[in-house]
Amino acid sequence: MAKYKGYNIKTKLELEFAKKLTEDGIVWQYKPKTFKLPGGTYTPTFYLSDIDTWVVVITKWNTINKKTYSLFAVKYSSMRIWSVTKQQLKDREYPTW
């Protein structure tokens, strides 16, 4: 865990993405809201308020997080939601702002 911009960032990958957002001048919040899902809750990694977009940073896809992310994306399909994987960050394949 690392402290950055007043947030306790959980993973190295999330920290890297937060720094990229800051470099690009993107206003962001770290895990500002938890959403209700059938059988539980889900907290996206970032909220980009200027472009009204939720971003989920995926360290490694597994059956549980694929299912939970899918439930989140379907239930809140009216919202703009992006997933960013470790490989995309490594390859510098960021979403276009």
Image: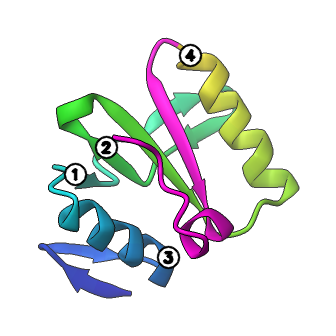
Q: Earlier in the sequence, mark 3 or mark 2?
A: 3
The residue pinned by badge 2 equals 47
93 or 73: nearer the viewer = 93
N-term mark: 1 or 4: 1
Q: Position of residue 71 (x, y in %)?
A: 70, 29
Extreme residue toward the right, this view: 63
Magenta extent: 78-97
Secondary structure found at label 2 = strand
Q: Is residue 85 left or right of residue 89?
A: right
What color scheme is it? rainbow
10 Å crowding of disc 3: few (<14), some (14-19), many (20+): some
Query: Decide: marks 3, 4 in contact (CB < 8 A)?
Result: no
Please give the residue where the numbered disc 3 appears in the rendered image: 13
The span from disc 1 to disc 2 (Cα, nearest Å) is 6 Å
- Secondary element under disc 4, as helix, strand or loop, is loop
Amino acid on which the number 4 mark rests in the picture: Ser
Give the image location of residue 15, x and y in percent.
Answer: 37, 77
Measure the alpha-carbon separation of dots 1 and 4: 21 Å
Q: Please tell me the numbered disc located at residue 77.
A: 4
Q: Please tell me how crowded label 1 is: few (under 14), some (14-19), or many (20+) other residues with Cα within 10 Å.
A: many
Q: Residue type at mark 1?
A: Trp
10 Å neighbourhood of mark 2: few (<14), some, or many (≥20)? many
The residue at which mark 1 appears reads as 28
